[in-house]
Image: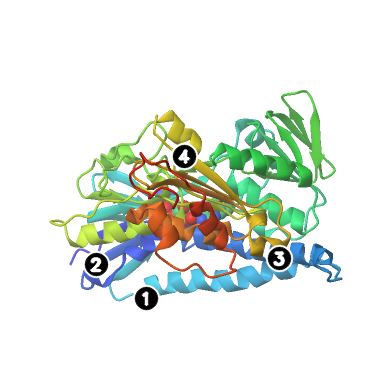
Amino acid sequence: MDNTHFDLAIVGTGSGNSLVTPNFDGQRIAIIESGTFGGTCLNVGCIPTKMYVYAAEVANTVRSAARYGIDASLDGVRWRDIRDRIFTRIDPISEAGKRYRQAGPNTTAFLGHAEFTAPRTLSISTGEVITADRIVLATGARPAVPAQIAGSGVPFHTSDTIMRIDALPRHLIIVGGGYIAAEFAHVFSAFGVPVTIINRSTQLVRAADSEISHRFTELAGRRWRLRLGCEVRSARERDGELALGLTDGSEVTGDCLLVATGRIPNSDRLNLAAGGVEVLPDGRIKADPYGRTTAEGVWTLGDVSSPHQLKHVANAEARCVAHNLAHPDRLHAFDERFVPSAVFTDPQLASVGLTEDQAKAQGLAYRAVVQHYGDTAYGWAMEDTTGICKLVADPRTGLLLGAHLMGYQASNLIQPLVQAISFGQTVADVARLQYWIHPALMEVVENALLKFRFDEQDAVFAPGEL
Ligand code: FAD
């Protein structure tokens, strides 16, 4: 038997690792990883960030306890203990995953960087060259660092490194205003660190519905120092103090710099041309809706090819590609119609479907409603003054077009709306054909749905009902 030939080679062990299903029992699988086994979500992404976010929420709960008549004080934040609790849980999972694949009955793990040397031929930095009937590229994405910072010589962190620092900074500067910036700003400021955000756009979380992004930016400005509408022009360091010169002529100083200016797909280090794999102008691997690249037998999934860069999308694509590899005659397509997302900042943000601006730009007939958390019983309990649930719906069909939440547990509250939009349930049915538990916070969603009132020509809803 040729030991260098495999039935399947998987490059990347994030979502790629889950491709090894019983469908491939008896087939020889190579799994190749150049970084930490388990990929971004487990090691440097979703999971550790949310473990920090939970601790941040505990700190903020203590801080705000007096509001509810509970006297409590935050005596301290033990950063190292928080960090070690997180990584003593995560690191063994990564290590066990690696050992499992190394010892697997039909898997061979290669711990090195893979790149194509010819169609369906991979050279690995550990010295091996392997061939495979089918190859899946699941190589993810990495932080993008602006040239002004990368070339300046100043020390900086990205999401890959900031979570493992040894001590809390005295003053954290974050460059970027997307979800990663917003989550880390929340975590560090809840832990008592002053945070300054420098962002090119005048809005934070710009991808959100503009009403949400405006409200969020306004709230963020009360908590963090915001330097919006400007970019970093220069960066220098002296005696552990960083000074960033901005395009508006001002300067920002701090002792720790986090660069969170987006992520770039890991397609550029695979020598894809040698494998016959084409890349889109934005750097993502070109793929059809089934996950097939332009090269025969080469498939892709996750952040390296998806426009979404979300773990639940990468997971869904992995399930799809696993099916398609096993059933070439019955291919499943990726379903990207309604991809929800959440930002675990403070307050949380969650979204699915079209924003109001998108509905408007597409010339759709739509109605938008906003329900405040503070106008529900649970909102009173929480003394909430900022949470909102905004819905956009089509008055002709009664179907939801989009849902956008900002507030406590937005990432959970949105799920019935994700379900409604995914299964084509009308606003009226979702609002009326089920019980909503009283007085749960979910009444925010129920009341938002009940706010729609369409006139008599709008056939879907009975007049006066909705
Ligand atoms: P990855 O998990 O990145 O796996 C790719 C693997 O391929 C890596 O291990 C890499 O080392 C390896 N690799 C790359 N090139 C090569 C090569 N040439 N040879 C061998 N190996 C290679 N998403 C959410 O849905 N919810 C969240 O809350 C969330 N939070 C996040 C927070 C942060 C800070 C970050 C950075 C991301 C977050 N994400 C979140 C995004 C999510 O982590 C990614 O969408 C997801 O992990 C992508 O999975 P993947 O399998 O495509 O890639």
Which numbered tag is attached to residue 28?
A: 2
Give the image quarter of residue 227.
top right
Can you identify the residue that label 1 sits on?
Answer: 103
Give the image quarter of residue 266.
top left
Lower position in the chain sequence, tag 4 or tag 2: 2
Q: Estimate the spatial distance between the alpha carbons at disc 4 and disc 2, rounded to whole Å.
A: 54 Å
Residue flagged by tag 2: what amino acid is it?
A: Arg
Mark 1, residues whose alpha carbon is within 10 Å: few (<14), some, or many (≥20)?
few
**The residue tagged with tag 3: helix, strand or loop?**
helix
- At x 76%, y 45%, the residue is 224
Q: Nearer the viewer, mark 2 or mark 3?
A: 3
Lower position in the chain sequence, tag 3 or tag 4: 4
Lower position in the chain sequence, tag 1 or tag 2: 2
**The residue tagged with tag 4: helix, strand or loop?**
strand
Q: Position of residue 306 (x, y in %)?
A: 39, 45
**Residues at badges 4 and 1 in contact (C-beta under 8 Å)?**
no
Which numbered tag is attached to residue 381?
A: 3
Give the side of residue 64 with respect to residue 466, left or right: right
Mark 2, residues whose alpha carbon is within 10 Å: few (<14), some, or many (≥20)?
some
Residue flagged by tag 4: what amino acid is it?
A: Arg
